[in-house]
Image (spheres, helix red, strand yellow):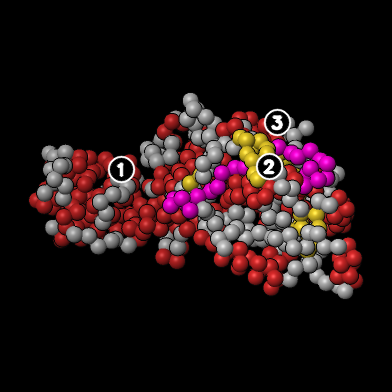
Amino acid sequence: MIRTRFAPSPTGYLHVGGLRTALYCYLFARKNNGKFLLRIEDTDQERFVEGAVENLLETLKWVGLEYDEGPLENGSEKGKYGPYIQSKRTETYKKHADELLAKGAAYRCFCTKDRLDDMRARQTANKQAPMYDRHCLNLPDSEIQAKLKAGEIFVIRQKIPYETIKFNDMIRGNVQFDGKTIDDQVLVKSDGFPTYHLANVVDDHLMEITHVIRGEEWLPSTPKHIALYRAFGWTPPEFAHIPLLLNADKTKLSKRQGHVSVEEYINAGYLREAIINFVTFLGWHPGSGNENEIYTLQDLEKIFTLEKVHKAGAIFNIEKLDWFNWRWQKQKHTETLEKLAKEIDPEVKIEETRPGQFKYIFDTQENEDIFLAKRGKILLEICNKHLDKKSIKDEKQLLKALVTVEEKILRSPKEIKENIEFYFELPHYEKDLLTHEKLGVDYKVAKESVKAATEDLEKLDKWTPASLEKALQKTVEKLHVQNGQVFWPARAALSGLKFSPGVFELAWVLGKKETLKRLKKAYELL
């Protein structure tokens, strides 16, 4: 049976790259009816961050990656290969380190920090790659025992065999390294804790991991790990090294540059489905002839293969994440609107409830008002965390405003402030905005249209989008002009912007008093 594992270190929040590794491990296991494990690699106690494990478990749960074995939120574990937290497995690592010492595949190193620093400085000065010079490799046993008796500090190093180490990577093909160019890696630190290399190999073997899927940055460590497998007499697992995540300038994406923790994107309001879609496509694609990019997690479980993972680095493009979020937001919102409309009126035409369409779809104004109010509340939930509610006194007006910029909210909820602020405070604009050469709107036409629109709207008793449209259509007929020659200057007068919702929606949100006030201001400007 195929068994994969996600083995993060609890050194902070879950990185986007870490989530991608977890996703690929999960998807590969599910596609092949295997098992997906979670293991916490916390042997580096100096970098341990309090609360990081809890955050990791919460994030994986939010994303929907359910593991078959590993630690649980209540402190217990599931699975028969535990403990799944490495700091609870130190005796296991000590036993295996002793086995390597006995076999001559590892040795104790008593070199001081000063000696190691001096050695590296000399190597650098001689333009050599810094690596341990094996000063302690052949110490006599009597000298080793004397140093141990004296309580001298030591580490345990791996004795890398001076031979060519070859392996087949499932993504990169045949790879080989010359053992003479590989450093004798520290396996056990002076504090008795194992390094990643020893703990990783021992645990992967004992937990019967069949496929190690990890980042490209671990490729140079793989020959060390294969050498350890051979030293123990174990069969190595299959390896698959996924591409680096890169910034737009092709530099490596890193925590130091910010905006790389999954939690940031969750808190920013991105949908789970969008994050899964986006992260999966960072280095993977279903293949030529398949242009679809919108997949549920369940869809991906059926089609994911390592053969479709790219070798080249994957560019982290936030605009692509925004696009995924818009697509998912729109799809989910459409389903919500359809359900809502059917609850109000089972006979309603579903095709007229699409996001961004501002049609009057119900037979009665009462039902229309109910639908629009509930529609506004749904949109409010989507963009709520990005709103400055202190500047908004009328929630009913806010809900109306949200409906008129529905498509923009679905595309980018975080930009809601600039998309509706003109409703609550008219921006300064020059009178040229009220004209439009292609529509045949000069100053004279604009002035006449604004004046006539003001007069017709002043007479209006019923203030609904439908009644507003009817009134302004009469204005067009009365002036014997084209629609745009009335709608353009009126819309510009109400929004103060070149681009905004339509004039009927604007007037409906602003209300009669504010609409007339803004139209009169435009007339005075002309």
Dot in front, 2 or 1: 2
Q: Is residue 233 magenta?
A: yes
**Residue type marked 3:** Asn
Which comes sooner in the sequence, label 2 or label 1? 2
Q: Are marks 2 and 1 in contact (CB under 8 Å)?
A: no
- Please tell me which residue lies in front, 448 or 66: 66
Say which residue label 2 marks: 164
Question: Where's residue 404, x and y in %?
Answer: 38, 47
In magenta, the rendered stretch is 228-251
In the image, taking residue 499 as reference, residue 72 lies left or right, namely right
Q: Which residue is mark 1?
A: 467
Compared to residue 170, the image places residue 395 above or below, namely below
Identity of the residue drawn at 27% across and 54% down: 497
For the residues labelled 2 and 3, the Cα–Cα distance comes to 32 Å
Q: In the figure, is residue 96 to the left or right of 419?
A: right
Q: Given the image, on which type of amino acid does mark 1 rest?
A: Ser
Q: Residue furthest left?
A: 444
Residue picked out by circle 3? 32
